[in-house]
Image (tube, helix red, strand yellow):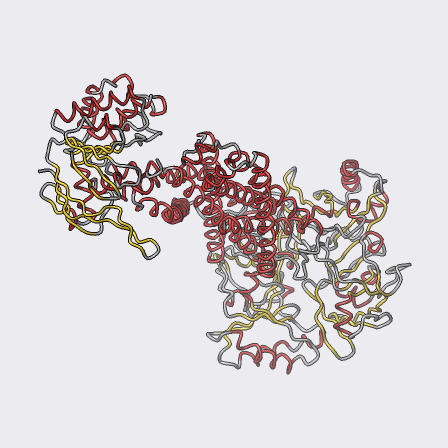
Amino acid sequence: MLLEIKDLFKWVNSGGNRIFLLNDIELTINEGDFISIMGPSGSGKTTLLNVIGMLDDFNEGEYHFLDQEVHTLKEKYRAKLYKDYIGFVFQSYHLIDELTVYENIETPLLYKNYKSAERKSLVADMLDRFNIVGKKDLFPSQLSGGQQQIVGIARALISSPKLILADEPTGNLNSKQGEEIMNLFKQLNDEGVTIIQVTHSEKNATYGSRIINLLDGRIINTV
Amino acid sequence: MFINLLGLATGFAITLLIIQYVRFEFSYENTHEKADRIVRLTMDYMDGDTVTAQDCETNPPTGAMALAEMPEVENFTRAYPIGEPNVNIDVGNEHFILEKVFAVDNAFFDMFFYPLLYGTKKDIFKQPNQAVITETTALKYFNKKNVIGEVLEMPLSKGVVLLNIVGVVADSPPNTHLKFNMLFSYPTMLSDKAMLGEYGETEDNWNGNNTLTYLLLTPNTNYERFTTSLIGFNEHLERLEIKKKERLIGQKIADIHLYSNKPFETEPNGKASSVFFLLGVAFLVIISAFVNYTNLATSKALDRAKEVGIRKVVGSTKSQLRVQFLIESLLINFCAGICAIILILISKSKFIEVSGLPSDFSIFGDLFFWIILGAFILLGVLFSGVYPALVLSSFKPSSVLKGAFTHSTQGVFLRKSLVVFQFAITIILLIQIFTINKQLEYLQNIDLGVNTDKTIVVSSPTQNTERENYSVFKQKLLANASINSVALSDSVPGQMVSQMSTTTGINLVEIIEDHNYNFYLTLIDADFIPQMDMKLVAGNNFDETSHPEKNEVIVNQKAIRLWGIPEAENAIGKKLKFWGNEWTIKGVLKNYHQESAKSPHIPVIHRYYDKFQSFASIKFHNANPKEQVSLIEETYKSVFPNAPFSYFFMDSEYDKQFKADKQFKDVFSVLTGFAILIACLGLFGLASFTVLKRKKEIGIRKVIGANVLNILVLLSKNFIQTVVMAMLIGVPITYLIATKWLENFAFRIELNWWLFVLPVVLIMGLVMFSISIKTINAAIINPVKSLKDE
């Protein structure tokens, strides 16, 4: 078991009313899973992903990640936990415009105090693995959307996370590029990386092993 | 918005004040219609081709001779300063002390613009014993303004000069080098008995140079032609064997205040370089204020990009948007103008005090002030309104509403270089302040070679009969246990050298080197040297056996060096010749500072006297002299019942020498303070802009593992680079400026490394403080928030 969420609630108060963003979430994810979270706009997909990624907190409930009780962890330890085990992939890639492909991929290692030689070899591996060695000195703006997303994934993978969280990773891509990215995820999953993606696309959802449907912050069914 | 306004208003206010100050400094003599035609003659003492000394005062016949010999000269007047620093004036039974009294020629009123409030200019001052006084003097002495026909008495040692008041003028304007409280006719100098007894001036005296000489040039003379003519005049005087080792130099009177700093000036003058320096700094301050405003306005504008996008979507055109931004900018600049006026109102009196402007100086009454303020506002709109208006109005609404703006990196570069420039200036200013402070501190704490502490100096009575009673006065004083010593001298350390008499070309009888140096002469009694703690390096002090007729002198080291005597011991017993006599060197004194440590040591010859003719210095053991004034006054009054009591504290004379420097330092400090404030505001603006621009990046970095510290370092790095750049530019420049400035001083500090490091550290601290306000906020924000806008 990689993570387990029990009776999780997240809400905001608006004008005296409590609005539930996440409502009584129960979820267990095992290593090697490939989960797709689906649901209409505003159903809480991204919020759930952020909570799983420990970027956002919640008001009530339990969250176990590996052997840690995330709900009792202090901010500092929580940050360490997600730095060590979780990689993020975004719809609009979120690469740093001023840095080259190489530097973008390298950045997470800088924050984990890897030595220079180690960083070099890890980034080289990653460039190699995704066939973007030739593009390593380019800036994000010089790449196509699909290529940017590949860099985004490479950056997410560089510190060998156990879990990849992808928020509509193909949302800004055309269908061909999207398919490429989904195949990449599939391949990574086959290599043992756990993946949770938020998606609108039925087709993309089929790449996963399980689909969680959300509505108004509630899990309505799991396929 | 508030910061924006504050920065701009401060910039406006400080620049306006400085401009007014500079205008005042440059306005000297502009009340005199003929100022551009009036030239003052001064004298250079030559030794071959080198100038050994200078003097503002010339010989009495110089003006008339110039009028006769030079066709360019239309008229002349002398202005003979009387009784520097003051004279006694009696009105009936009342005793007054009057400063700034000159004997002038009839042409004075033709040359200088002084309309008479009462009296007539026709034939004025052609007769002896005529006087013109100012309104203020009239009110003080007679309680009325029209005092024509009243009589003033000026008691001198050989009698009383009677002066009939023939005119009353308005007070001298603050912007003239020649300020006076009373003028009297020059013929008085030549024919009044008491006057002749005191000054012995004659119409053909080519030996003593104690009068200022002003020439009025003919209307169409250009100054260059006059200068050429003056060379011929000098040659003429040389041919007549009147002036062999002196040369006359012309100065336009309008240049005197800022460009002349010679011995015997009528008042301490300003310095053009200081004034230009301040003006330059003020200019930089206003530029900085504009730069900051533009920076802040643009980053604020980016904040408003969404508003712009929405306005565009609902149909606003580019030009409508531009007009909107320009109007907003105009409003802000206008408000800044009003704030500036308020700031000036608040700080006006303080500024006038600090800068030494006349206390009734009008700032708002000057049309020029309003023109400049208007120009600032328009420039502000131009600088600060146009750029954001153009940038913002051309945003594409679709991308703006998505939250993505296009930033040109060029703009960032420009912005950065402007901030580097600002900080370079700030660092330069701060290092200068440190240097100026250190140097003035050094000068004021330097060992002067004399001890002026706890000493009251009293002036002698004017009548000889009273002066005879000095020994009684001295005995009475010494009977007090608190009084250490009483000594006589005709000048005291700390006074301007202009209050000493000078003679050139004093040499040894057995001439070693024949030079035309200028020597300062002073009279002292036997008590003076021990009282002042002056050190004799060879020979002896005057003693009971000393007598004025014995022609003994005590000189200082500087003097024997000029005569080419290397060892003080060798000087003892050597004979000097001057004034038709031979004088024996009895002692050699260690050099001491007569004026202040600002000027180099001067060669001084001390002659012996035992008459109470000028000053008696009274030194206390431990008492605070300020509390002892009444004791001295009582004693003085009991011995000299007919003399006005006037006194000063000897150490305050030294402090006076630093007045101008302190003023410059104060104005400069205020200006620097504002420059730093404005630069920090600018940095704050840049920080807000950067943080805004990098909001997304910060979010990304946090998600991929950066902690708050990482982010702070990331954001600060750039600013530190900025300051380091500024430092690299600023430090060499300021090193040059500081070195140059210190060259003005005969005694100066070494430029220490910490004088440079401390300001830089200080600036760095300020920088960290002003940016951390913004960056900490940005660093702790939850990245989910900054990455949301998809």
Left or right: where does residue B72 sit relative to residue B679?
right
Taking the spot 77% from the left edge, 56% from the top edge, the residue there is B79
Taking the spot 55% from the left edge, 61% from the top edge, the residue there is B654
Residue B321 place in picture, x, y as percent: 56, 38
Name the residue nearer the viewer: B558 or B444.
B444
In the image as oriented, which residue stretches furthest toward the right? Answer: B122
Residue B241 place in picture, x, y as percent: 77, 43
Indicate the quadrant where residue B183 lies.
Answer: bottom right
Total numbered labels: 0
Position of B665 relative to B526 (above/below): above
Position of B298 relative to B253 (above/below): above
Residue B156 place in picture, x, y as percent: 74, 70
Name the residue nearer the viewer: B196 or B411.
B411
Visible residue check, residue B572: no
Name the residue nearer the viewer: B771 or B258.
B771
Indicate the quadrant where residue B124 lies.
Answer: bottom right
Residue A79 place in picture, x, y as percent: 20, 43
Quarter of the picture containing the C terminus of chain B is: top left
Left or right: where does residue A115 sit relative to residue B53?
left
Position of A149 relative to B517 (above/below): above
Name the residue nearer the viewer: B728 or A171.
A171
Visible residue check, residue A43: yes
Position of B630 relative to B336 (above/below): below
Taking the spot 34% from the left edge, 47% from the top edge, the residue there is B777
